[in-house]
Image (spheres, helix red, strand yellow):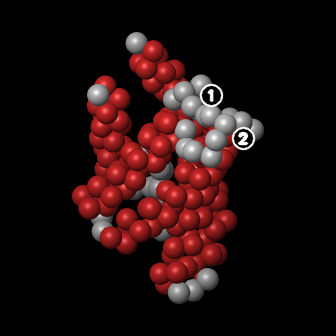
Amino acid sequence: MRRTVELGFLLALSLILSYVESLIPFSFGIPGIKLGLPNLIVLLLLYETPDGGQKKSLHLPKGAREALLVNGLRIVLSGFLFSNLYAILYALAGAAFSFLAMLLGRRTKRFSMVGVSILGGVFHNIGQILVAMLVVETFAVAYYVPFLIVAGTVTGALLGFVGIQLLPYLRRDNRE
């Protein structure tokens, strides 16, 4: 029961971060660049247990399942609250690519939390560009890729550093 409440709180927090992000005019003339504030919750859930909650199996570890659930619900709810169906489609594609990259980065243990966050930022943008190519039916939008990689790297690094600062508080709360 307590964990359900904690996940509900994290979902609410990620919705608040989505709303705050929608208010921040963060664009350098390139459509779609965002800070990715709600991805901080996904990152924290992936790192909540020191070993990633991993067992020697193909199943998702508990933290990864929870991150996937919270992020999926956040995307659908924030899409209906703050944007539209196309935004949900783009966000789901970005989230799927981002989640897989972060999960693999976390599992290999070759990346720090900052590195995993950067993977998430970059692959989120790649997922969204792929959807954009399908929606507008042209590869011309691919010229955004270098800019989006830089943006994903910078924002991913920032969120990774914030995650490092917040993670001890999340872990301490779970020990009580």
Q: Report the residue at 59% width, 25% height from top.
A: 50
Question: Which residue in the structure is indicated by mark 1?
Answer: 51
> Whole-percent x and y of residue 84?
30, 68
Q: Residue furthest top?
A: 176
Can I make out residue 115 in this image?
no
Q: Secondary structure at mark 1?
A: loop
Q: Report the residue at 50% width, 36% height from top.
A: 62
Question: Which residue in the structure is indicated by mark 2?
Answer: 108
Q: Secondary structure at mark 2?
A: helix
Can I make out residue 1 in this image?
yes
> Whole-percent x and y of residue 12?
29, 41
Q: Report the residue at 32% width, 46% height from top.
A: 15
In the image, is residue 51 above or below residue 91? above
Q: Nearer the viewer, residue 128 or 152?
A: 128
How many other residues sit within 10 Å of disc 1, few (<14), some (14-19) or many (≥20)? few
Q: Report the residue at 64% width, 68% height from top.
A: 145
15 vs 121, left or right, is left
Q: Amino acid at mark 1?
A: Asp
> Whole-percent x and y of residue 168?
51, 21
Q: Tag on residue 133?
A: none
Q: Quadrant of residue 176?
A: top left
Q: Residue furthest right?
A: 110
